[in-house]
Image (cartoon, rainbow, N blue to C red):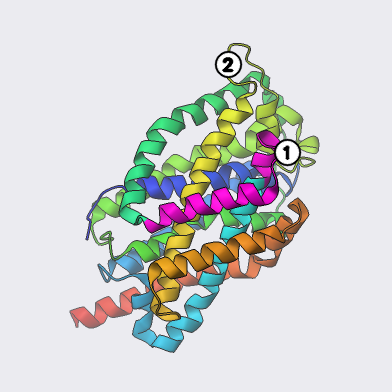
Amino acid sequence: MIRNGALAPLFFAAHLGLIFFLYPDKMVGIAHFGHWAYILTGIALEFAMLWLFMKGLAAMPGTPLTTLFRRWGAWTARLLLLPLAVYWFISLLIVLRIHAETLMIIFLPRTPKWVILLVLVLLSLQASLIGLRAVSRATVTLLLLLMPIMVFSVGACFLNTDVRYLMPLTPDPFFWRSQHYLSSLAAHSGFLFLGMTAARWDFSAPRVRRSIYVAMLALVPLYFLAVYIPILIFLPGNVDKFHYPLTAAFDTVNIDWLLLDRITMLYVVGSVTFILIFAALLIKINTELLRDLFLPVSKPVLSCSLAALAFILCLFVPNWRAVQHFLDMDTPLRMYCGVLIPLVTFTIGKLARRRRLA
């Protein structure tokens, strides 16, 4: 069991693809102004649930989520964690389909959709089969290589921004009722994979928990930049007309000396790389959850089956509207997994700790 290591970079990278693609489109659809409040509310919610989640995992070091929930009985564990397995699988479908469409638009307009999807699925599957520790070490290298590109891409967008579009700052007091806001919380659910890493990383070690909190703090400015860059370029009333507002914002930047034709290409390369890491995580942790509770078959067979099923179902997702429908449809699952799972984990961990100390 590892007391530190590369878990924090893995946590950071797992959020990046969701922040840069999924998050801006949903946030700008809530209202025309006051986005700072909507962003901070989502971040605060994730911080609270992350704290509860890691406290519960720390109470029983070396115990993954499935084993922890089994303390209330095997069938109770299956009942409580089946929605999480379904949610992870739907998330896998969404991220693969969104990024396949993005690659078609930016790089490969004449390439069939199934070819791009197949490449994304195979790369994600290959990464998932090499193990979490290897993926976490590779993530560190990829972050060192790609984050300067992402920072440069984001910084270049400020050439076309107008800070006057920040005003007014007053938020909509009923924003939490918006379906756009509820869908945006998908970008705050990336912490759930930590539950299946507890057998490898020791969450009772303060250094591990601190490293995750530091990674979460590092994500905060990225949440703001992903939302406010398109707003400051296109005006609050116009930005919600784009399916990919941040990608459209990058497309407005023209730098003559750049090697590639558009800065968008740099951004997409980095973003797709991080989403492949997230997709590999989803395959890996879902395989372990399903194998522990439902399907006692070998991990490679189960991982390949999940990847094949995801590829087939992605082919039946015709367009962006269908993806939006998936995001709206899994809102109850998202709320259950993002709120109830951490609360139950915290409760089980605290009860187990009291019994151990009694």
Characterize the magenta stretch by its predominant secondary structure.
helix
Position of residue 317 relative to residue 356, above or below, is above
Q: Residue 239 lies in what quarter of the image?
A: top right
- Regarding mark 2 in the picture, which secondary structure is present there? loop
* Residue 78 spot, x, y in % from top left: 46, 82
Which residue in the rendered view is the most extreme toward the top? 257
**For residue 258, which numbered disc appears in the image?**
2
| Front: mark 1 or 2 | 1
- Any magenta on residue 7? no
* Residue 325 spot, x, y in % from top left: 74, 61
Residue carrying label 1: 110
Position of residue 64 relative to residue 319, above or below, is below
- Regarding mark 1 in the picture, which secondary structure is present there? loop
Q: What stretch is highlighted in magenta?
A: 101-129
* Residue 150 spot, x, y in % from top left: 51, 31
Q: Residue 350 lies in what quarter of the image?
A: bottom left
Specify the amino acid type for callout 1.
Arg
